Structure formats: structure tokens, C-alpha cells
Amino acid sequence: MKKGLLIVYSGPSGVGKSTILAEVLKEEDLKLSFSVSMTTRDPREGEEEGVDYFFVDKETFEKAIKEDKFLEYATYVNNYYGTPKDFVEKQREKGYNVMLEIDVQGGLQVMEKCPDAVTIFIEPPSLEVLKERLIGRGTDPMDVIEQRVSRATGEIEKSATYKYHVINDDLSVAVQEVIDIIRAEMAMSESDGWWEEQPIEE
């Protein structure tokens, strides 16, 4: 069985990452699997162990850090969050293409440890459009929106190391671009080493 891809999928808040991904996941031939993160925060109502997160205590998480068991990790609101290497590798060995929806900081960590990762960055048509979308959601006060736009500026600057950049100007076009990228990478992966499998002609 051919080993699955590791796909790093990032983009600023409000760019439409989750909306695009929901459509991409409908394509069964892509064999996508979401990575399950480990965290030290308490489970919320309805969350399942091993489905939403792997829930552990701080001591267990820090031991895993020392043993280099994460592709990436970060702290947020006094809790650790990280991507376990073992889970990702087991899914890839089963032939699944593992999707990591993470921020640029985490994405850069993964790239260092996994140079073969397929990296996709979703961009807004402009920062002005992103700000309009955030205002349109009506979920954040203006000062928070300004912070998100400022952070997006930094993320876009750091995204130069991503192989693919998809501009979410038209949702259906962006969805198709992401699908095409994954299919193209799958085809390239499957063709690797094809000459080794050919019978030798007498």
C-alpha cells in the first residue's frame, strides 16, 4: 500500500478555510483523514477522546515534548496543543492522506520535521476583503477584528514557504483548486519509483 500524504493546510482567521475544507472532504477519492490533536485542556460537553482530541494532563504532555513525540505543538490560554507523530504516521501507513489544519507557526514546525509535506495556504483576495468578511460575520468587536487582520498580515508574510497558495475570491473555484492540488500530489506520489516496479525486458 502506498503511504498517504501529509497535508499542511493553513490560512488566516476569516479566510474561509473550514468552508473550503468541508467541500473538499466530500470528495471520497481523496482519502482524507483529519489529524487528532493532543491537549491538556478539559473535554467540553460532547467531545470524545480520540475523536475530537487526545486529552492528557500537563505532565504527560511535557514528557511527550521531551521525547520528541510531536510534529508541532503550542500553548494557548494556558493549555498545550500538539500534533502527535505516531497518530499521523499510522494513518499515513494505512494509505490515508492526513490533513493538518493548523496555523502558520505550527505549519513551519511541521515542514522542518517533514520536508515531504504538501503545504497549502488559503489567502484572501486582499486584507480589505478579509476585514469586510470578519465584520460581516458579526461575531467579534472591531478591536478584535483589527487584531485578526494584523495577525493575518504576519501570517501571509510567513506563508512564502508554502508550496501552494489558493486565493479564496470565489468559493467554488478555491474548492476545486484545493481538490486539484491534492489529486495532482497523489498522482505524483503514486508515480514515484514506478521504474522500480517495471519488469525487465529480455
Image: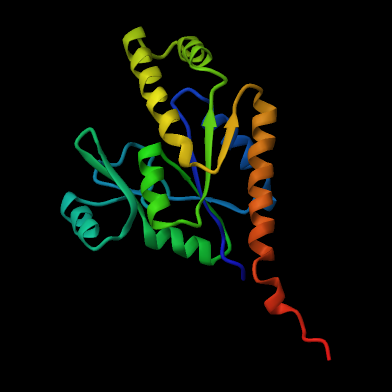
Spot occupied by residue 74 in the image (x, y as percentages of width and height): 28, 42
Spot occupied by residue 32 in the image (x, y as percentages of width and height): 58, 51
Q: Residue at x 44, y 10 (%)?
A: 138
Q: Residue at x 45, y 35 (%)?
A: 159
Spot occupied by residue 165 in the image (x, y as percentages of width and height): 57, 35
Q: Residue at x 41, y 23 (%)?
A: 153
The answer to whether one can see residue 33 in this image is yes
- Outermost residue to the bottom: 202
Which picture quadrant has residue 187?
A: bottom right
Note whether 163 is above or below 188 in the view shown: above
Instruction: Decide which of 155, 182 is in the foreground and name it.
Output: 155
Note whether 83 is above or below 135 in the view shown: below
191 vs 123, left or right, is right
Q: Quadrant of the N terminus?
A: bottom right
Spot occupied by residue 50 in the image (x, y as percentages of width and height): 39, 53
- Outermost residue to the right: 202
Tally the numbered discs.
Answer: 0
Q: Residue at x 39, y 45 (%)?
A: 108
Q: Quadrant of the C terminus?
A: bottom right
6 vs 23, left or right, is left
* Model colouring: rainbow
The answer to whether one can see residue 26 in this image is no
Note whether 9 is above or below 96 in the view shown: above
8 vs 81, left or right, is right
Note whether 170 is above or below 197 in the view shown: above
Which picture quadrant has residue 189?
A: bottom right
